[in-house]
């Protein structure tokens, strides 16, 4: 199954892929490798929006599990996504790719606020727009932020680059017989609670008919392969 023609894409990267082989934080060498992939996607003629998670630094749920107030911990998680966005901006600009970071939590010393029409203009000018701080509210994740930005920026697909190469019928880390889907419907993902993105993000993509492509960003050149319809991936769509 192949994707419809993609002109504008939202690429969501889990924070953990910025760690490289570290256990925590940001590995600048690995971020530079990711930036090369993004640059290649842009040079192939695509308009690229980016959303990066924060799980390599802090997740609200983890803080709450250790007794923190959940909302407070979530705000810390959102700030972590801003750090990752700035790291990616740095790596892209070192490769000569123009970028703008727009954060859902305003911090005008370091980046712009999210302004949809301004983001449109940046894309028209060939800049990569990195959306930070998710939806700007606690109790959400950057998956929801990615689905929201993909919808408002009218992206043709949401590509979720993570450490697994697609969506499985059970957890491949625990079940050696787990089978990867080539395609799966939004409704099945939601009904079977398959590990793709959180339910609100999947529902938002379903309601706005945005295909979700889950693939591993850890292998070099994989983003280009997936965009060419040649990579190992799972496509989540209506039917
Ligand atoms: N977060 C939030 N609201 C949002 C986006 C993120 O509260 O709209 C917080 C939440 O605590 C989350 C953390 O930021 O755990 C980091 O984001 P996420 O877990 O989505 O990162 P990823 O798993 O993609 O690395």
Image (cartoon, grey):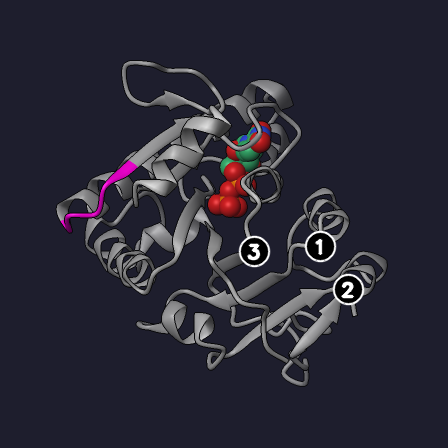
The count of marks equals 3
Q: Helix, strand, or loop for circle 1? A: loop
Task: Tell me whether circle 3 and circle 1 mark residues in contact (CB < 8 Å).
Answer: no
> Which residue: 68% across, 65% down?
236
Helix, strand or loop: magenta stretch: loop
What range of the chain is rendered magenta? 95-99
Q: CA distance from mark 2 to mark 3?
A: 14 Å
Q: Is residue 139 left or right of residue 213?
A: right
> Which residue: 24% across, 60% down?
36
Residue 54, compared with residue 170, is above or below; it is above
The quarter of the rendered structure image containing the C terminus is bottom right
Residue 48, compared with residue 129, is above or below; it is below
Q: Is residue 209 left or right of residue 72?
A: right
Determine which quarter of the picture holds residue 111. top left
> Which residue: 32% across, 65% down?
44
Determine which quarter of the picture holds residue 158. bottom right
Q: Nearer the viewer, mark 2 or mark 3?
A: 3
According to the image, label 2 marks what residue? 238
Residue 202: x and y, percent?
Answer: 71, 51
Task: Tell me whether circle 2 and circle 1 mark residues in contact (CB < 8 Å).
Answer: yes
Residue 59 visible in the current orientation: no
Residue 95: x and y, percent?
Answer: 15, 51
According to the image, label 1 marks what residue? 209
According to the image, label 3 marks what residue? 156
Residue 4 visible in the current orientation: yes
Residue 62, compared with residue 24, is above or below; it is above
> Which of the two residues, 206 or 35, is positioned nearer the viewer here?
206
Of all residues shown, which one is farthest toward the right?
Answer: 191
């Amino acid at each position: 199954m192949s994707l419809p023609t993609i002109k504008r894409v939202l690429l969501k990267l889990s924070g953990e892929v910025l760690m490289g082989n570290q256990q925590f934080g940001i590995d600048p060498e690995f971020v530079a490798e990711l930036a090369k992939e993004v640059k290649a996607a842009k040079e192939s003629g695509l308009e690229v929006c980016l959303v990066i998670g924060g799980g390599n630094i802090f997740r609200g749920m983890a803080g709450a599990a250790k007794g923190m107030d959940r909302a407070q911990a979530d705000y810390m998680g959102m700030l972590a996504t801003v750090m990752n966005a700035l790291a990616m901006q740095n790596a892209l600009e070192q490769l000569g790719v123009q970028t703008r970071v727009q954060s859902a939590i305003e911090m005008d010393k370091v980046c712009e606020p999210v302004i949809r029409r301004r983001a449109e203009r940046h894309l028209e000018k060939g800049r990569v727009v990195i959306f930070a701080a998710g939806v700007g509210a606690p109790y959400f994740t950057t998956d929801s932020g990615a689905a929201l930005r993909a919808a408002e920026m009218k992206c043709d697909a949401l590509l979720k680059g993570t450490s697994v190469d697609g969506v499985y019928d059970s957890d491949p880390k625990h079940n050696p017989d787990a089978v990867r889907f080539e395609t799966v419907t939004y409704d099945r993902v939601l009904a079977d609670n398959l590990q793709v993105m959180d339910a609100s993000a999947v529902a938002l993509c379903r309601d706005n008919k945005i295909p979700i492509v889950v693939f591993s960003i850890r292998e070099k050149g994989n983003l280009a392969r997936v965009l060419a319809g040649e990579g190992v991936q799972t496509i989540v769509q209506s039917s």
